[in-house]
Amino acid sequence: MPRLTSRVRLLLGALVTSFLLTTVIAPAQAEDSSSSPSSAATPSGATILAAKSYPGVQLIATTYTATVTVRVPVINQAAINTLAQRLAQQALSGAIDTTEEAITEEIVDAVVKSPSTYFLPGAQTYSRRNSLTGVGTGWVITPDGYMITAAHVVHTPDAQLRREFAVTSLDKLGQQFVRGLQRSGTTLTNDQVDRLRTAILGWLAAHMSVNRLRVSVSAELALGFDGLGKDQKSVAAEVVDRGKPYPGNDVALLKIDGQDHLPTIAVGNNDDVSPGSIVHVVGFPAASTFSPGLSRDAQVQPTVTEGPVTAVKSTRGGMPVIQTQAPASPGNSGGPVLTDNGSSVGVLVASAIGSDGVAAQGQNFVIPASEIKDMLERNGVTPEESDTTAAYSKAIDEFYQEHYSAAVPLFEKVEVLYPAHPFAKKFITDSKTAIDEGRDKTPEPKSTNVALLVGLVAAGLLVVLLGGGGTWLLARRRKTIPAGAMSPTYAANGMPSPYAGGGMPPAYPARDPEDATAAPPVEAPTSPPPQPVWDPERGWYLPEQDATAAGGQPPEGRP
């Protein structure tokens, strides 16, 4: 029995040696590479939607920096003695085998079930300043930098934050834990290692303190560089307002300063979708965004998935919630959920969790646009499409219709408005290449005959306007006619007439009836009859009668 007790103590002592140098580590970033959004050969509506939405969606990073302190565990000698005696008695009675493997399994099982029984906080402390970074998705709603994301992307509850700080130490802790056991000569199965690692992690989390916490939020703005591809620039973001994590109103409003002409995403309405509608989830799922082997350039490009709305439900608090089968995963949180026309009907915030603790595929929840609008109204913010987005959307339409000559100046306008645009440069290059290869299908300019027709119509309109102007002038002069002078009246056609009684000008004076029988017939004049002229001194008169009227009385009918 003493020999068995000594073996138990030896094995437990080896467990303790693995804890003394444990450190907390942050996960390393991986690189990514993905294709350009302009590489699609046969564009679909979803392809065009994706290309238009990419620039307005940004990676959001929240960094928690704190001092983590934990008291180094020591063996609870009294508990060890009790365990050793119990195992020895069980071995003598035949309840357990006396092999090293059997005794090791009994020890592991006892520690895993109650780590706090066999380890106590020691006098020595371990302290380290450590940082954790969580990522999510956000989207720009105004040209000057207001953004929407999920509240839980920018705020982690204290209890969860403690667990996260403990989890980040898992890899380092596990390595040192296994090394300590190996130095003791103990052979453990992989299952035993995993179980012990989980148990000690729980003990550390329970005895860990997190102090001097500092939280910083940033938007990793996508940038494009001529000839160098795409990258990101970290810009500090202010949390203007935030709701409560789901099932609360899990929405946050951010503001990044010093921005102008940022690409934007439109905010839609709840009733833009209903069960059966197709929606598109845009964001930065961590598994693919930071997948090993992909380029840095690919981290700039969001991922787009689509699926139907399966239900519109409500929380216990009465808030509507949209449920969708569009695939999503950690990192998509906070991203926009778009309709086919590119407006966002809400923010992706959560997935359904099964009884096994695993997220259920195709059961994702969206906080609707009405909650976003309520928050914007409280803070006096109005969503606005940027000039950059207006020009870029037109350019994308032209590009995917293979109107490359029409697309180039629009993309160039985008670069003038927002020189750091991450995608415009690639589209310009692709468009010019297509033009050089003879693939441009931009419609020819309209015929010059059309321009001539427009000119003739304009000239005709000018004549009408000038005619109307003369009529107005005539009416204005009417007011200055001297007393007794003839005033114009209106003819049957509605135009002013200088003749009393209205109608057309009077005919020439009739011949004497006797003369009419003797005189040869007079042919009708080949030129139009003379038109009367107004003179302020003379009134209305016919210019052709000036000669007969000279030196005598005015012709009959003239003043």
Image: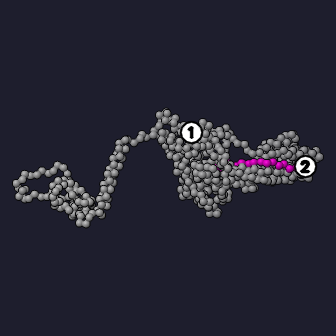
Q: Is residue 153 left or right of residue 205?
A: left
* Of the pair 333 and 455, the residue shown nearer to us: 455
Q: Is residue 329 left or right of residue 479?
A: right
* Of the pair 84 and 28, the residue shown nearer to us: 28
Q: Quadrant of the C terminus?
A: bottom left
Residue mark closest to the camera, 1 vs 2: 1
> Which residue ends up furthest to the top in the rendered image?
437
Report helix, strand or loop for mark 1: helix
Q: Residue at x 72, y 56 (%)?
A: 157
Q: Residue at x 20, y 56 (%)?
A: 542
* First in sequence: mark 1 vs mark 2: 2
Q: Residues within 10 Å of mark 1 (few under 14, many from 20)?
A: many
Q: How many marks?
A: 2
Q: Position of residue 448 (x, y in %)?
A: 37, 41
Q: Is residue 473 above or below residue 236?
A: below
Instruction: Give the magenta-colored segment's residue range.
Output: 124-137
Q: Position of residue 220 (x, y in %)?
A: 65, 46
Residue on which disc 1 sits: 426
Q: Residue at x 26, y 60 (%)?
A: 536
Amino acid type at image mark 2: Ala
Q: Position of residue 399 (x, y in %)?
A: 50, 41
Q: Is residue 438 left or right of residue 57?
A: left
* Of the pair 89 and 366, the residue shown nearer to us: 366
Q: Is residue 174 magenta?
A: no
